Image: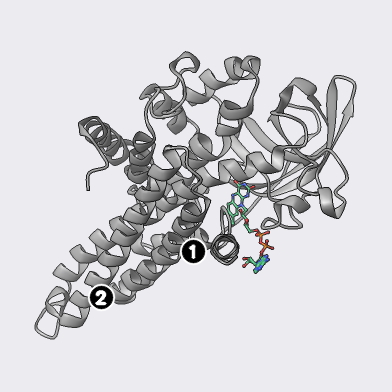
Amino acid sequence: MKVFDEQHDMFRATVRSFVEKEVMPHVEAWETAGRMPKAIFRRMGELGFLGLEYDERYGGAGADVMMTAVLHEECARSRSGSFAMAVGVHCDMASPHLYWTGSEALKETYLPAICRGEKLTAIAVTEPGGGSDVAAIRTRAVRDGNHYVINGAKMFITNGAMADLYFLAARVESGSDDRRHRGISMFLVERETPGFGVSRTLDKMGMRASDTAELSFQDMRVPAENLLGREGVGFYEVMRVFQRERLVAGLHAFAMADRALEDTIAYVRERQAFGGPLSDKQAVRHKLAEMATDIEAGRWLTYAAWQKYAAGEDAVREVSMVKLFTAEMVNRVAYGCVQLHGGYGYMREYPVERFARDARLMTIGGGTSEIMKDIIAKAIVR
Ligand SMILES: Cc1cc2nc3c(=O)[nH]c(=O)nc-3n(C[C@H](O)[C@H](O)[C@H](O)COP(=O)(O)OP(=O)(O)OC[C@H]3O[C@@H](n4cnc5c(N)ncnc54)[C@H](O)[C@@H]3O)c2cc1C
């Protein structure tokens, strides 16, 4: 089945060349530094990679959804989950809140700089007290004249310390049990807003070049026009953008797994044991075959769900299956690839070691595997 045309293939070649020349040589240094330079986003903006599906009048490329798929697959092949995640958050997890629900004035003000990579974005939903239960968020926004006054904290925010614009979920009404989904709104917050603070940058198991922060807001006055969409419908907007986030996570997962499998095949062809290359042993070949099959299943489940989603159909069940399957799959592949590298697979100098740590996030971030199972079960058990 063909899902990409010639234009997609040409775009893939362009992104791949950029990743090989301008990202991969720096991955180790970014891991050590615990962040990547913001200049990489400006460079991607120059190349026209950011805001792919956004209208050209805001600086976007007016491209289709499969162009987005190409971008994220190629970023994930960089052997840096961190880089893929930072780009994914900017393009398809944070800024869609503005494109889909922002006023014309907000879009004109901010989208061109987002597409040029001059303003980096972050999505701030999770709180120190919990992430899975989005309706339980406690950050409060109280209307005061032409402003909302926001108090609270956000946890585990990607691009959190270095972003310029934050898409922030806050509660505008107290959450009595039957209304807790309805009291939430989304706000666009500029980093320079008085009262905005980065409490700390978080140290992590993997995705180490990704900037993850805890944020705090103390009497932060946000102009009322920075409310995105109608007051009180933010929960549903978060859920809507989650669909896109989870599809991007699927792309990341199978593309990262694919790259690690390629690296592992190259390794077992070189590595000698018991009088020949590891790649001649049947048990090794079977393991490679199993992993390749797992990756293909993830790839095609993801493409099918992307297409259903792009056609405007309700794809919540399929998208949740993508997130569940690919996140668990990439961890199975990570385990297998490290195992086939033997002791070297446990060494920092081999990319497969980083892959295994990066992959571990996939069953947690953007909705855990348990939450995906809950959503799927709700759709199939009546
Ligand atoms: C590196 C990293 C980057 C992230 N980036 C962002 C970001 O940019 N923006 C953002 O808003 N958030 C971000 N997150 C947060 C992420 O989305 C949450 O960690 C995730 O949604 C889980 O929330 P939690 O950590 O509070 O876990 P909890 O919700 O406390 O869950 C803990 C465990 O309990 C399980 N559990 C919870 N409820 C149930 C239930 N009803 N039934 C069964 N099991 C359940 C969960 O599956 C999980 O295993 C990031 C997290 C990490 C680690």
Q: Is residue 314 above or below residue 378?
A: above
Residue closest to the far front: 382
Against 292, is 273 above or below?
Answer: below
Label 1 packing within 10 angstroms: few (<14), some (14-19), many (20+): some
**Residue beneath the point at 36% across and 49% down:** 304
In the rendered structure, the answer to whether residue 163 lies left or right of residue 69 reads right
Q: Residue at x 88, y 45 (%)?
A: 174
Say which residue appears at 71% left-offset and 56% top-offset.
133
Q: Amino acid at mark 1?
A: Arg
Query: Gap between marks 2 and 1, in whole Å?
Result: 20 Å
Between label 2 and label 1, give the one nearer the viewer.
2
Any part of residue 1 in sight = yes
- Helix, strand or loop at mark 2: helix
* Amino acid type at mark 2: Lys
Q: Characterize the local packing of mark 2: few (<14), some (14-19) or many (20 or more) Cα atoms within 10 angstroms.
A: some
Which residue has dot 1 on it? 360
Q: Position of residue 347 (x, y in %)?
A: 37, 68
- The first of marks 2 and 1 along the sequence is 2
Which quarter of the figure has residue 6?
top left
The residue at the far right in this view is 144
Q: How many marks?
A: 2
Image coordinates of residue 322 in percent, x first then y, are 44, 56
Decide if residue 219 is in sight here: no
**x and y, in percent, of residue 192 in the image:** 72, 26
- Position of residue 340 measured from the top left corner of the image (x, y, whole percent): 28, 74
Outermost residue toward the bottom in this view: 274
Q: Which residue is denoted by mark 2 in the rendering? A: 287
Q: Which residue of the protein is positioned furthest toward the left in this rendering?
A: 275
Q: Is residue 127 left or right of residue 76?
A: right
167 vs 281, left or right, is right
- Figure quarter occupied by ligand 1: bottom right
Asked where in the image residue 291 lies, by quadrant, the reply is bottom left
